[in-house]
Structures are given as structure tokens and as C-alpha cells.
Amino acid sequence: GDPYPDGLFDFLEGYTVDTKNGCIIFPMVEPFGSHLRKRLGDDALAEQYLFQELYDSTRTVALQFPEKNKFRLTGEYRGSSGTEINLNAFNVPPGSVKVMAGGILLTEGTDYMVDYLSGTVNIINRSIIDAGTPISITLEDRSLSRMQRKTLAGIDLQYDFSKYLTLGATLMHYREKPLVTKTAYGDESAQNTLWGANLAYRKESLGLTHLLNMLPFVEATQPSQLSTRLEFAQMIPGHYKDQHTGGYSYLDDFETSISGIDLRSPYAWSLAATPYNNGSEGLFPEASLSNHIDYGKNRARLAWFFIDGIFTRPHSSLTPAHIRNDLTQLSDHRVREVLEREIFPNREPYHGQPTILPVLNLSYYPTERGPYNLDTNVDSEGRLLDPERRWGGITRRMDIRDFEEANIEYIEFWLMDPFVNDTLGTARGGDLYFNLGNISEDVLKDGKKFFENGLPVDGDTTAVGYTVWGKYPKRQSTVYAFDNSLGRESRRIQDVGLNGLSTEEELVYPTYANYLSELRARLSTEALSQMQEEPHSPLNDPAGDTFRHYRGTEQDRKELSILERYKHYNNTEGNSIAAEEDPYASTARAIPDAEDIDNDNTMNENEAYYQYRVSLRPGLMEVGSNYITDKREASVRLRDGNDAKVTWYQFKIPIREYQAKAGNIQGFNNIRFMRMFLTDFQEPTFLRFATLELVRGEWREYRRDLAIGGDVTGTGHLDISAVNIEENGSRSPVNYVVPPGVTRAIDPGQPHLRQQNEQSLSLKLNDLEPAPR
């Protein structure tokens, strides 16, 4: 600090001020923490003013201490700007913009120009800018009010008692009708009445003229006029009232108190790396291996997809004939269409939008090997042994990483009963896991980042390196785009999957050649014969990564089922090369596959995450346990004309109630990835997610003592969630009903009468400690 402080702020660029970014730099560490304690010299006094949480916690946590957030920095500055000023409004009413410079009203067209459509003001009087005169702008923003229904009515009455005396009265009434019945505080619609009266008396007088002529130097020749005018006016203010809400305004109607971040899109998910946890909760010890084929030995086949409507849409000319005529398959709960009213019967559809839900499907086959699984522990038919030890998973990046700032509280999803087709009751079930945090992008763990467009198309062997899995590019990635210098041949060379090897190269690569040699010794003659004919068997696709589109003439010729068509859709070799002689579009993506899920041009190898386990077993699918908060039993009409019962379950997983923690992770302010995987299943399992989202709230739990502001001494926590008529209108044992005096709002943006959702905030106290006696 300054050895001779004078109490004045020293303006030193780069030391106390950053003018480029508009920042003030304090010349000491922790000015409102340890520094303040030292200057006060009294610990008891310092505790009243210190804001230490500002430095040892995140910004979101520090905001939980309003009793300490009392410091305010004030000052003045002078800045310069360009001639164009953005009004942050569109379609501004012409003539409503007023610009003042130093308190003087400027003239439009001379001093400034206004673009009313885009909402910008351009100062054309350069002398105002050069002088640095402060500019203030006022405008009328009618973007919302223009949509309101407004009524203005008035009457003006004038009555002449004589030619000298007139009495008048005026009455005006202005009324606004809001777009919605729930009016937010500060946005009330006006309902004002203005009334007034006026009296006018006017008469010519010669006598007054004679009196004026008696004054010296005055000589009036015209008759004088006596005129009196009295006016009175009063405005009676008011606001809109209706039969439903009365005259009340809402501080918060809770309709947006809870919102979701949709995670269903299958195109955002990628093949997951083996979950690594070196603690006692670790599930897969092989995850610690690097550049070793055992790393992927337990990865089973998992497919994730939306089902294209060409298969399930009635009367579609694009549906393959064998599927269109197979009403039994189209009635299968694993593939059938799911209508919105099946899960949300109280939700009214939008005009012109389809009412079919886009369902995320996970098809898990624990006895079939997944990509890059070279395990030879199989039976004579090639099926994986010990299926309950296998796993299949997918990973995606998080677009919002700071869960504390966004106040993300739950993982929430509606899931179709996984055992809906288990009529014999033989299904054992298994576990569904979620990981939140830092997840490794090294799918083939070798410490080398792979990206398909890094493979040279000119055959330069010095540009690639080799691992146990295959080839990897030695150059750095800058952009993910295929090399098109050799046309279709370039794509064929580069689009080979995450191991850098085409199927032809895999057949002779030592790792895969040894695998096939051991595998053949374990298979029966009949299994070998069948695998020779199957293009996706280990004999024809050693790595198990060859792509197959769900549409194609070959798929139609073999009359593959819908589920079979999607089994290899997520593979990476050849997924961007269209078949030359196939009339169908047969690519899954246009950019190269890479071990870089979040596209930051680096490969994350760290595993540090929170883990959550959902047990999917027939005996545990009950509301109130296993994170299940609601269920919906629906009766649906199937394509074969029969009616069937199906149950949907709503799961809510509090993100702070994790089952295990892997690695060095602290807090929820840097959640980069989510991984979802299934394990401990013995039979093929099909999960259908009608919704899958992260739930965030506008309200936070206050975790401080209300009396003294310190840490809470007792136990208990507040569960903040929302209930609404669309999702919880049929909940058992207590369903949600619209509160008395409240009606569902009508959507003003729809051409027909559509009721919006009606939602309330739910506060639940858990494990509250009894008050001391």
C-alpha cells in the first residue's frame, strides 16, 4: 500500500484501475476479509463487518449472506462512446424518443437520427460527442402494451344558460385489459376515470369603459369585456379487476418458478468411457488400465435414438411394407408412438403442433458386446458371459456448467415401466446410474486424443502413431471437418471410427487378429457359420464399430424389426458416408467423430464426479421410494385395435443427495459432463424417456440462521419443488387441483382457446429437529 496514505484514491493504470475492462483494483488482498480484520484490530468488532465468504466460497454461496453483503463502492467516471446508441427496444413508436444532452433537448433530424424499427439512436451532431456532454434518452416502449386491449371513452357536455353564461362537464374513462388474468406486480393494467366541470361567464360592459376613461391618459373607445373561466378536474385512479383474481397483483405466480433443461436429444450423447472410481464404490476395476484391451472388456451393446415417424406413423407411404403390415410390432410398447395425453392428460396442445412425444429410447443388450469390446469370455454362441457385470453408457456435455449459479436441483424424468412386457414376471432388473462432473473423453483409454479428420489421406505413416487400439493422429486438432481433397475416397479413409482403423485394417491388426483367433476357438461350428454371414459379427467387424443406418434396401430385404434397425445406428465407422447405390439418406452425422465431446479441442482424461443410482427392479417401482415421486397409469389404444395398460413413473433425483463421489470434486459450480449407464442387468432392457431434464428453480433454500445469521445449529432441510395440473393432476394419493379463486390462464398467442399450465410452489420440510423444551 501507499506508505503515506492521504485518504484519496490514486488513479494508476494497471495498478489500481483497469480502464479497458472498467475494473477497480484494490491494492491489498481480501480488502473486506483478512485485511479489514487487521485494520480493525478487534475480532469481535470485525465479525460484524467481515465478509470472508466472499473469498473462500463461490459467488452463489456468498449471496446467501445478505447480512454481510453491505459494502458499496460509489464514484464518478467519464467515458466515451460511439455515435450509435442501442435503445434495447424494437418497433419504437415514432416521435416517442427524446434525447437530451446536458439537460438540453436535442432536435431530431438535426442532432440525431432514430431507427424506430431496430431501436437505435445515431448522434449526428459531432460537437456533442467531442465535448463529452452526458446524453440521456427517454422513450416509450410499447412492445407489450400494444398487444393489450384498450378502451377509451368520453363525453363532453356544454350548456348555455344564456348568451353570457355557459356550464360544462367532461367525463373520460380509460381501461386496459391484460393479456393474462394473473397480473404481475408493477405491470397492472390501468382503469382510470377523469371527470371535470367548467364555468364560463363573458359580457360586454360600457359602464366599465366609462370608468376606465376617468383615468388620466386613458381614452377607451370600444366596449370593455368582462370574462371569467373556472375549471375543475379530478382523476380517479384504478386498475383492472375481474371475477377470478379480484384486484390483486401477484408477487410471483410460480408458473416459472421451476423450469427444465431438456437432455433427451440423442444427437447430443456420445459413447461413454468406462466409469472410473478408485474408491470402494468403484464398479469396474479395468477402468484404471490404459492402452490395454481389457479396458473395454465389459462394454455391452447400447443403442440410443428417437424412432423415426416413418415406422410408426399411420398411412405413411414411406413405411416398409413388412412393418406397416405387422400390427403386433407396431403395438409393442418398446417402439409404439407415445401421445402427449398419455402422460399429461391435462395438457392442452398447441395449435398446429404434433401431439406425439419425442421419446428417448435406450436399448441395452447385456449379452452382446459393445464397440471395442475384445473380451473372449463368451459362450459357444458368442454371447457374453456374466451379463450382470457388463455395462453400457453414454456421455454428453453440459451447456450450463455452474449448477450453483443456475440453481439446478434435480435430475427429473418420466420413464415407461421397463417391465411392461414382462407378463411372466421373470425380469430381474438392474441399475441406472448418472454421473455429474468431469468425465473422461478418452473412450479408448490410451492418453492419445483421436479425431477422424486427423488421419492423413495421402498415406503419410509418419503423421500417425499406434496404440493397442489402432492408429491416432499426431497433429493437433484445430477444426473438425473432413478432408475433401480426394472426394469420396478422403471420406472413406478418415471415417473409420475411434480406433483409426477400417474394417479391412482391423482384420490384420495384431490386437484384433489375436482376438479373432481366441474367439474362433470358443465358438461352435454353427455359430461360426452364422457369424460369417452377419456383417456386424466379430468375424466381419472385429471392433464392433461399423455403422448401419435404420433405413436401407438391405434392411428392407432382411425385414429387420425397428429395434434391430437401430442396434448399430450409434457406431462410428462409416456413419458419415452415404451408400452409393442406396436411394435412402444413410448418414448419421456430417462432422468427424472425435474424443472431444464438448468441442474445446482438448481431451479431458480426468474422472471426478458425483454418482446417483436408480434401482430399476420390479419390486422397487413404488411412489415414495427409489426417487419415484409420481406415477401415471394410462390406458392406450394400440395399432392392433386392442386396449392396454401401461405405467409411467416420474423420478426426481436431488443432485446434492449423491450416492458416491469419485475423484477430487468440490461443489457444483463446474459440472462439465453427464454420463448415464446401465449395469447389473441379465436380460435385454428397453428404457423409454418421455422427459429427461435438469430442473432449476427461481427460489433457493436459505441455509442460515434467521435470528443471528450464523450457521444453522439444528437439523432439517427444505425441499423446494413445483406441482402443476398437467403433470400432477392425477397423482396418487394426493393429486394437484387448481387453488380456489384461481383459473387457468388462456394462452393469448394461440388462435384457439388453449388453457395454460397452472403451477404452485411446493415446500417440504424434511428431518426437522423438534424445538427444545
Image (cartoon, rainbow, N blue to C red):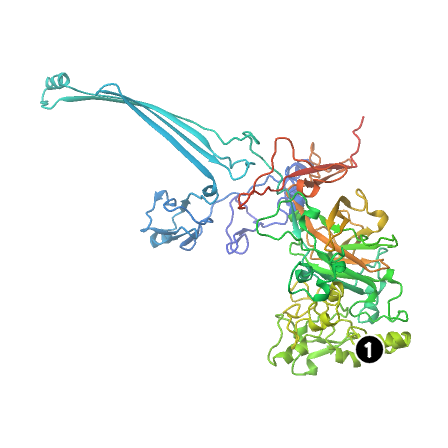
Residue under the point 47% across and 49% down: 88
Location of the C terminus by quadrant is top right
> Quick check: 245 above or below 84?
above
Dividing the picture into quarters, in which one does residue 318 lie? bottom right
Residue 552 percent coordinates (x, y): 69, 71
Dividing the picture into quarters, in which one does residue 487 lie? bottom right
Q: Does any portion of residue 442 appear in the rendered image?
A: no
Using residue 534 as the reference point, say whether residue 575 is left or right of it: left
Using residue 353 as the reference point, say whether residue 305 is left or right of it: right
Q: Nearer the viewer, residue 650 or 210?
A: 650
Dividing the picture into quarters, in which one does residue 733 lie? top right
Residue 468 percent coordinates (x, y): 79, 75
> Quick check: 649 above or below 771?
below
Using residue 252 as the reference point, say whether residue 79 is left or right of it: left
Q: Which residue is mark 1?
A: 532
Residue 218 percent coordinates (x, y): 10, 22
Q: How many marks?
A: 1
Residue under the point 80% across and 73% down: 537
Near mark 1 (Cα within 10 A), the count class, few <14, some 14-19 or many ≥20, is few
The amino acid type of the residue labelled 1 equals Gln
